[in-house]
Amino acid sequence: MQKITIIAILLSAIVLTIAAELVSQDYIQKVRPEIEDQVEANVLKLGSFTDYIQQKELIENAEEAQEIIDEAAPEQPSDSNEALESVRLNTLILELDIPRLQLRFQEIPERLFDSFQISKDLVNKEVYAIVSSDQQTIASIQEIVTDDEKKSQQIFEEIKAISSSVPSFSINQTNEFGDRSFYINPNQDSDSAFLINQKGTLIYAVAYQKQYHDQFKDWFELLL
């Protein structure tokens, strides 16, 4: 009797296994196309992402190589940035009494003095340059040109109003240079001076190291 019971249990197990296998095969046949589509889609996504990573690496390598080339080459304005240069600055920078000067035009920063934004509606042309001596940055100059003097005065007053509203700044309007001018003074120790001056249709926002104050003061007389 025990042998018959064992045989019956074994037969039941075999039948259940076969039935489960048949059911699973039937399920796989039904869902396999959908699974294959999902797998293929994921492979395509992975392939696209891999291509993206490879392209990104190529671009980064190219940019790094270009930086090395730029550092090795003599510093001069890029041809692609000619529209962003200023003949006035290129000419007058030679009169700044600081040895081994270099002027390099760059992309205009989003914020003036890296602190606040100004409206661009009244601006006709704008350039930004870095001044260096012996490979050390000593100043930045942002030249803003408008169509008429009234617009330049509006921009001047806007910059003054915005900078006056910053708690960490104080304003000292001396009108020493051009038609009107003022210094922006950080409320903490700083080795830099920040000057906004305006004359006619021109506005200059200049940040420079205080150790060169006398040289820049004389130069502003020529600039404006």
Image: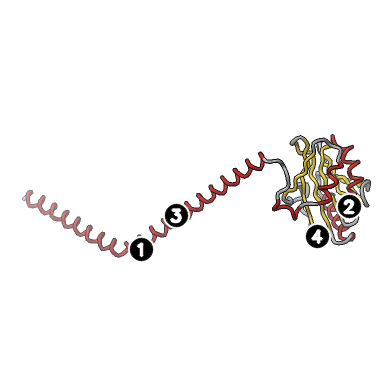
Decide: is 204 above or below 151: above
- Asked whether the beta carbons under mark 1 and mark 4 sit within 8 Å of each other, the answer is no
Q: Nearer the viewer, residue 42 or 140?
A: 140
Q: CA distance from mark 4 to mark 3?
A: 47 Å
Q: Viewed as shown, does residue 180 lie left or right of 83?
A: right
- Between the residue at mark 1 and the residue at mark 3, the CA separation in whole angstroms equals 20 Å
- Kind of residue sitting beneath label 2: Gln
Front of the two marks 1 and 4 = 4
Residue at image point 94% right, 46% down: 176
Question: Where in the figure is residue 49, as x and y percent of width and height?
Answer: 48, 53
Residue 106 lies, in percent from the top left, at 73, 48
Closer to the camera: disc 2 or disc 1? 2
> Which image quarter: residue 186?
top right
Q: Does label 3 or label 2 sit earlier along the sequence?
A: 3
Earlier along the polypeptide chain: callout 1 or callout 3?
Answer: 1
Identify the element where label 3 is drawn. helix
Circle 2 sits on which residue? Answer: 198
Q: Which residue corresponds to the image point at 78% horizontal and 44% vertical from the top-left?
A: 103
**Above or below — where is 26 with respect to 75?**
below
Q: Earlier in the sequence, mark 1 or mark 4?
A: 1
Q: Nearer the viewer, mark 1 or mark 3?
A: 3
